[in-house]
Image: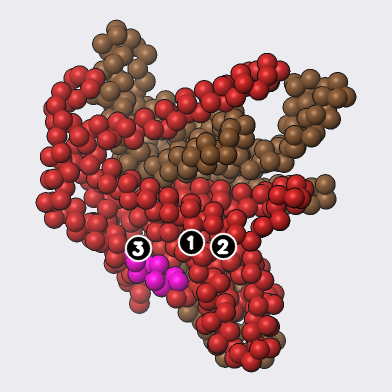
Amino acid sequence: MLKSNKPRGRRSAGRFHRIVWAILIIYLVLPLVATLLYALAGNWQTTILPESWTLKWFQDLLHDSRFTEAFVRSIVVCGISLIVSTAVMVPTVIIVVLEFPKWEKVLNMLALIPYAVPGVVAAVGLIRLYSSGPLAISGTIWLLCGAYFVVVLPFMYQGIRNSLRSVNAVMLQDAAMLLGAGRWQAFRYVLLPNVMPGLTVSLLLSFAVLFGEFVLANLLVGGQYETIQIYLYRRQGESGHLSSAVSITYFVLVAIISGVMLRLGKRVLNAPSPADDDKPATGNKKGRGASPGTAAPGITLQGGQES
Amino acid sequence: MSQPLTLAKKPARRFRFKPVALALIPFAALIVAFEVLPLIYLVMTSLLSDDETHYTLAQYATALTSPYYLKAITNSVTISLGSSVIGLVVSLFAAYSLTKLSGAARERLLTISNMSSNFAGVPLAFAYIILLGNNGIFTILLDSWGLDAFSPDLYSWTGLMLVYVYFQIPLATLLLYPVYFGISEQWKEAAALLGAGSFAFWRKIGLPVILPGLAGTFIILFANSMGAYATAYALVGGNFNLLAIRIGSLVAGDVVTKPQLGSALAVLLGLMMMAALAVNARLMRGLRKEQTNG
């Protein structure tokens, strides 16, 4: 279909591609629109569109202390995980890249494991290890935070490492120390600021992933600690309208985060390539190098959400 | 597996930066506690007998011979293969069309794909219930047209497939889009000058160039749906006989738990994922090498 359309000239080909995407967008947006309709519907039983409209469900949501609590719990568990992850990963990656480059392979492998271990598999090992014995933290938020540290490990590692690579951290540190900075000063005033953009993108991505995480939360702490996803799952059976309103709230929040993330990510990735235009060959290569990078959040975002 | 354990010790012997290596201890501790040890425990549990008195391969034997669990594995593989193929074919066109659109439109569409790839798991299952559930919009619509025979049953395998395809398409598009940049417009012109039609170009040049990227994308889609749990769980609870669902209920189920068998199934799932991702890594390495050479 595609090919037979090509010779007919640019305009009709362009129209074909636009139609492909118009259909695709309808398909992708449809479930969201349905959820939105349900969240705004007053009475909706056997008709195609709601019989009446209301904002009641969103109001109910604001007054539902269970929702607010679940929301706060999600923020708390994501917050702890991300603070710990930042505090641990930034020095670790910087030290390994600068001082022990040979170990980068080990670090890389450790950061790849979470991709190969779906949430349900990770949960089995964690439950076995922590349900009895000296470290019986099963069912507590600490186990979930530990599990989440591993979930976000790939994003944190890649974000920080890519930032270090794009500024050539080794040379930067050498230059700083040549100018009389100590190791700590070089870390604090030269390397850390350069890691910030990549770190910000990683953090936003990690937050979006953790906020939507269901499997680990359900299997590890399930009953004891109701996060937003677990709340959503439980409410689904009770009140469809209310859980639609939760879905929409949740999605708007994640959409804002990923919007900011994409914008920031673009700036981070595009900034250091001013010479792209005059050299198509390298420009192309750079484009390729950068694109899998921007696509990676897609993979991992999905992976994190689903598994 | 023992590598991370030596992480903090190694430098003492080989390097002189002892104090700096100390800063790696928190990382090593967290990794050991939450990544490495759980995996070791998982494997060890899978090798235990039901009463945990001795080591045996019985759990694997059960997992691979019991018709019930075998069915769970084949079900997972079937739905993953199916949804990956459909997702790949759709996104093959979608990603190509994307490269033909103007820059601004492209950015906007990529943003939409990225955002809808966030829409997965519990909220997605719920949205599909609103669309296609017993009182769903489309169910009622088709009913009112007298076409209720065509309305898909969301709580069947067809329904599950529909939902899986939904989360595969945006992911596949995001992954395939950069792959098309491997084909330059000049090749098409050169091929056309030499007399190749559009079909011949894609068959002889275009497809071979994007093939490793296609295969890699397919593998990621496959792995993604093999590990998927939330969508199916939110749709029908533990009722679908899928590998991930079985593992979950064997380990943290409401009725009976059999962590040993659950662990064996989890190890099998993990091995499948690792094999898939290893093949993908190899394909990608080949692709990168080709690109830097060419």
Q: Which chain is brown?
A: B
User: Mark 1–mark 2 contact, CB under 8 Å?
Assistant: yes
Q: Residue drawn at (53%, 32%), measured in percent from left and top?
A: B87
Provide the major secondary structure of the magenta segment: helix
Disc nearest the viewer among 1 and 3: 1
Q: Is residue B255 visible?
A: no
The span from disc 1 to disc 3 (Cα, nearest Å) is 13 Å
Position of B168 with respect to B12 (left or right) is: left
- Alpha carbons under labels 1 and 2: distance apart: 8 Å
Q: Are marks 1 and 3 in contact (CB under 8 Å)?
A: no
Mark earlier in primary sequence (1, 3): 3
Residue beneath disc 1: A202
Residue B85 lies, in percent from the top left, at 57, 31
Residue lying at the far top in this picture: please name it: B146
Instruction: Name the quadrant containing residue A185.
Output: bottom right
Q: Is residue A274 left or right of residue B252?
A: right
Q: Which chain is red?
A: A
The three-letter code of the residue at mark 3 reads Cys
- Label 1: how many residues lie within 10 Å, few (<14), some (14-19) or many (20+)? many
Reply above or below: B14 against A298: below
Can residue A78 be found in the magenta stretch?
A: yes
Image coordinates of residue B82 in percent, x first then y, are: 53, 30
Q: Chain of mark 3?
A: A
Let me know if residue A232 appears in the view: yes
- Name the residue located 50 percent from the left edge and 69 percent from the top edge: A196
| Label 2 residue SS | helix
User: In this figure, which residue is indicated by the disc labeled 3?
Assistant: A78
Q: Amino acid at mark 2?
A: Gln
**Which disc is residue A158 wearing?**
2
Instruction: Read off the magenta span.
Output: A77-86
Q: Is residue B86 above or below residue A59?
A: above
